[in-house]
Amino acid sequence: MTKIKHILVLGGCRSGKSRFARQTADDMAMDKKIYLATCVPTDREMEERVNRHRDDRGPGWSTIEEPVLVHEAIDRACAQAKVILVDCLTLWTSNLLFHGKDESGVMASVDLLLDALNRSACPVILVSNEVGYGIVPENSLARQFRDIAGLVNQRVARAVDEVIVSMAGIPVQIKPGRMEP
């Protein structure tokens, strides 16, 4: 029996990470693809982004909108899906913080996510922003978010089979890799 492969796709804003993740999912399955959206649009610009992402997906995709309980959505969807694409963990982390979770609460939610990945009957591709490459934010809340998002990415990266970083639209596989601990 072939092991189900889970993939984390990281990158900065407009790095091509979502496009690469979608193309990877399209290569895995023609139909029964689930797009698990964590975004809660709060303004017109974000609504336009959501619509653009939806238009880019095309046929064969179903969408589940779940901003917080991603693990439950994966558990429900994996029975009928051939592949699940979670876009994105960064917004999910922000949603968790908005709902009053502190760092330990976010990490407990990551544990639930990783448990759902272990139970999943289909591949899951997760997208996340690599927020640590930028300047140090000027305020405490932004620094807290950056730090927690980095911890989320590290935990998920350790648990998945492959990690891809997209830079300037070029995907680079970093896991498995030679320098893996």
Image (spheres, rainbow, N blue to C red):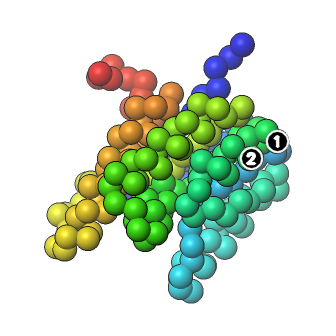
Q: Residue furthest bottom?
A: 44
Q: Nearer the viewer, residue 71 or 11?
A: 71
Question: Residue type at mark 1?
Answer: Gln
Using the numbered discs, state the Cα–Cα distance from disc 1 to disc 2 in whole angstroms.
6 Å
Residue located beneath label 2 in the image: 77
Where does residue 69 sit, x and y in percent of width and height? 59, 56
Q: Residue at x 57, y 64 (%)?
A: 67
Where does residue 74 sit, x and y in percent of width and height? 66, 46
Where does residue 134 sit, x and y in percent of width and height? 24, 60
Q: Can residue 173 be seen?
A: no
All told, the count of numbered labels is 2
Q: Residue at x 45, y 62 (%)?
A: 96
User: Is residue 127 found left or right of 26 in the rendered image?
Assistant: left
User: Is residue 2 found left or right of 9 in the rendered image?
Assistant: right
Q: Residue at x 35, y 40 (%)?
A: 154
- Say whether marks 1 and 2 touch (CB < 8 Å): yes
* Label 1 CA crowd tier, 10 Å (few <14, some 14–19, many 20+): few
Look at the picture and state if 119 lies above or below 25.
Answer: above
Question: Residue type at mark 2?
Answer: Ala
Indicate the secondary structure of the residue bearing disc 1: loop
* Label 2 CA crowd tier, 10 Å (few <14, some 14–19, many 20+): many
Q: Nearer the viewer, residue 57 or 6?
A: 6
Residue located beneath label 1 in the image: 80
